[in-house]
Amino acid sequence: MQKFAKFITNSVHFFYRPFRRYLPEQLFLYAVCGGANLILDWILYFLVYNYVFAAGVQSAHNLVYVSLPFSGTLCITPHIASLCVVFPITLLTGFWLNRNVTFTGSSVRERRQLIRYILVVALNLLINYVGLKLTVELFGWYPTPSKILVTLITVAVSFFAQKYYSFRK
């Protein structure tokens, strides 16, 4: 996996050359890696929402029923169910990219980085949850554009928290 991280880093550095006067290297690495993970998130969300949970559904008010062991059934909306499926995937890809490409100079131990990363992502998940609830259910906006808007808010929160908390030097 380290060879793959080195390949990604070298590839990003190749495209960094024209931007080096305008952006610090770490910010550029974060933007590229975060952007790639963000696009993965949006694509997965679109696919899961449209082809898994909302296939044939005309309204976001239809519910997804999830059977839970020992506690009955949980009812959630398709846009929140999609968020729950996509979240763990992008959590892992985001951590790997941040640790191995963007914030490689951190002196924080890997386990502590992961715990801190998860805490920051949990904050972002809360922002996503509240944002989707507001935009889709209260404002009546379409789920995919709502997800994109809410994610843009979390990007700013995430960069500063990851740089100064999760992967600090």
Image: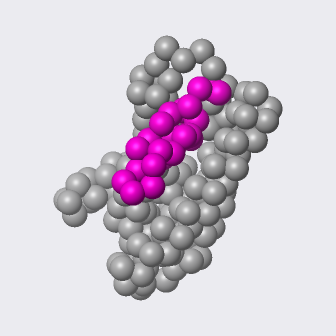
- Image position, residue 79 (x, y; %): 57, 35
Q: Is residue 62 magenta?
A: yes
Q: Estimate the x, y position of residue 108 in percent, counting from the top left.
A: 42, 84
Quadrant of the image occupied by residue 71: bottom left
Residue positioned most to the right: 139
Q: Residue at x 35, y 78 (%)?
A: 110
Disc count in the image?
Answer: 0
Q: Nearer the viewer, residue 163 or 44?
A: 44
Residue 47 vs residue 153: left or right? left
User: Is residue 134 visible in the rendered structure shown here?
Assistant: yes
Residue segment shown in magenta: 60-86
Query: Against 165, is 78 above or below?
Result: above
Residue depicted at 62% across the width and 38% down the height: 147
Name the residue at 50% across, 34% down. 64
* Residue 100 included in the magenta stretch of the image: no
Q: Quick one: quadrant of the N terminus?
A: bottom left
Residue 52 on image: x %, y % = 41, 27
Return the x and y of residue 78 as percentages of the image width and height.
54, 32
